[in-house]
Amino acid sequence: MQYRTMCLIGITSLLGSIWYGESASANRDARVFQLDEVIELALTSNPTLAAAQGTLEQAQGQRVAAGAYLNPSISGSAGRGAIRDPSTGVTITERTITVEQPLEWPGKRAARQRAAEAGLASAYAGLEEARLTVVAEVKVAFYQLLLAQQDADLAKQNLRTVEEVADVVQAKVSTGEAARFEGIKATVEVQKARKEVDRSENALVVAQARLDVLTGKGLGPGFTIRGEFASVRPGLDRQALIARAVERHPVIRRHQKLVEQAASQVVQERASRIPTVSVQGQYHREAGDESLTAGLSVPIPIWYRRQGEIGVALGAQRRAEAERLRVQNELEQTVTQHAQEVQTAQGQIRVFEEGLLKQAKEALDIAQFSFRHGTASLLEVLDAQRVYRQTLLEYAQARADLSIALARLDRAIGELP
């Protein structure tokens, strides 16, 4: 009777702390982060956002350059000169000064400015797109780490209970009250439990490193997280989500602005066929002569009229339009995929909550009851305990899958309504 009582106490201690138990090896001095804190840290330290910000600064510089006027040029020359006449003997410093100002065709400058404005708008959309991506990646990594923490806690709790039971079994085997086979089986169960602990701890380290990298190493060593999985979101209409994504997603706006930029570059290249006129003014002083002249310099496009540059710009425009269509189609496919993942995860959660969790708990209760009345062995109780723990872990996995699918759907839509 003492043997059975001690085993039941060990099993009950596992079930009583299955969700809220703390790991005995946890570092109490480690910082604890919640999801909002991790997201805020990532938005300030993630290199992806820094790269997007650099692209935005480049676009701002290009807009400044597009609005600049062409600079004038000044040239001059000077030297000693004399009249070849012995009767005069005039000797002076001869000099020539020329000022030239190019006059750009207004249509060409306006097209260049429109292209730069479209590029800047595309960069702003790219920054917003990068922010959505970072937030989604942080959420996914956070939920994966949350699942890894729960998995590690369950594995350690299971190991403690199995070790306690194994100690009792070995004691009974040594006194002859239990068969040697039960001792061997208990030892195997301990080895399996330790293997699960090693696996869960390795997964936990990997998940921590992944989340730390997303924050630019801002979480520090030995950190932990605290939070809950996302809740079920009923009533998500797939067609409405697709329409919302196509209408407002920054990736669509970014590619639309790239199309506008390419179209403006086509206009700019066509306007460049009109020559850039240069106004010239010249002052000339030499021995016996002084003059002040003005003139125009006009390139004549006879042999070449920028057919190559126009063709390149037209090809870039067509490529941008095709890329926009491709991105839109992929976005619709992504929304469909993640919306279906959300529905699947929600269905799995309902199965667990409406049946599997209860059935696994009832199976364990029956095994415990039968063990108390001598109709079930300790190994049968351990098997029922293992099934119940696995069911709890799979339930946590389903909740993590739902949270991850919602995070990815949020990124695909541009923010869930």
Image: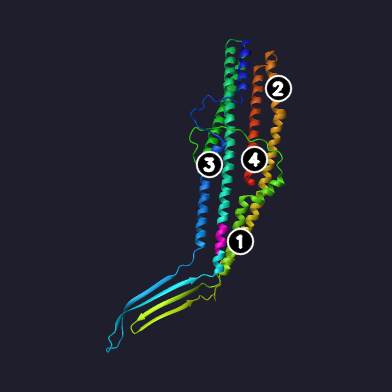
Disc 2 or 3, which lies upstream in sequence? Answer: 3
> Looking at the picture, how far across and down is residue 261, in whole percent?
58, 60
Decide if residue 19 is on the left or right side of residue 62. right
Q: Which residue is mark 3?
A: 42
Q: Which residues are magenta?
A: 112-119
What is the C-alpha distance between the residues marked 1 and 2? 66 Å
Q: Is residue 217 above or below residue 277?
A: above
Q: Residues within 10 Å of mark 3 (few under 14, many from 20)?
A: many
Decide: is 409 above or below 269.
above
Mark 4 vs mark 1, CA separation in Å: 35 Å
Q: Residue furthest bottom?
A: 87
Task: Decide: is 176 above or below 353.
Answer: above
* Residue underneath mark 4: 406
Q: Which sits earlier in the primary sequence, circle 1 or circle 3?
A: 3
Amino acid at dot 1: Gln
Kindly identify the amino acid type of the residue bearing the numbered disc 4: Leu
User: Dots 3 and 4: beta carbons under 8 Å?
Assistant: no
Quarter of the figure that contains the C terminus: top right
Q: What residue is at 59 percent from the left and 12 percent from the top?
A: 172
Decide whether residue 153 is among the magenta residues. no
Pointer 4 with pointer 1, Cβ within 8 A: no
Frontmost of labels 4 and 1 is 4
Counting residues from the N terminus, which is met first, the one under dot 4 or under dot 2? Answer: 2
From the image, state whether disc 1 or disc 3 is nearer to you.
3
* Earlier residue among tags 3 and 4: 3
Q: Do the residues bearing badges 1 and 2 touch, measured as CB atoms within 8 Å?
A: no
Residue at figure coordinates x 66%, y 31% from the top left: 395
Residue 360 location (% of width, % of height):
69, 25
Which label number is shown at residue 317? 1
Q: Which residue is label 2 attached to?
A: 362
Q: Where is the N terminus found, in terms of image quarters?
A: top right
Q: Position of residue 178 (x, y in %)?
A: 62, 13
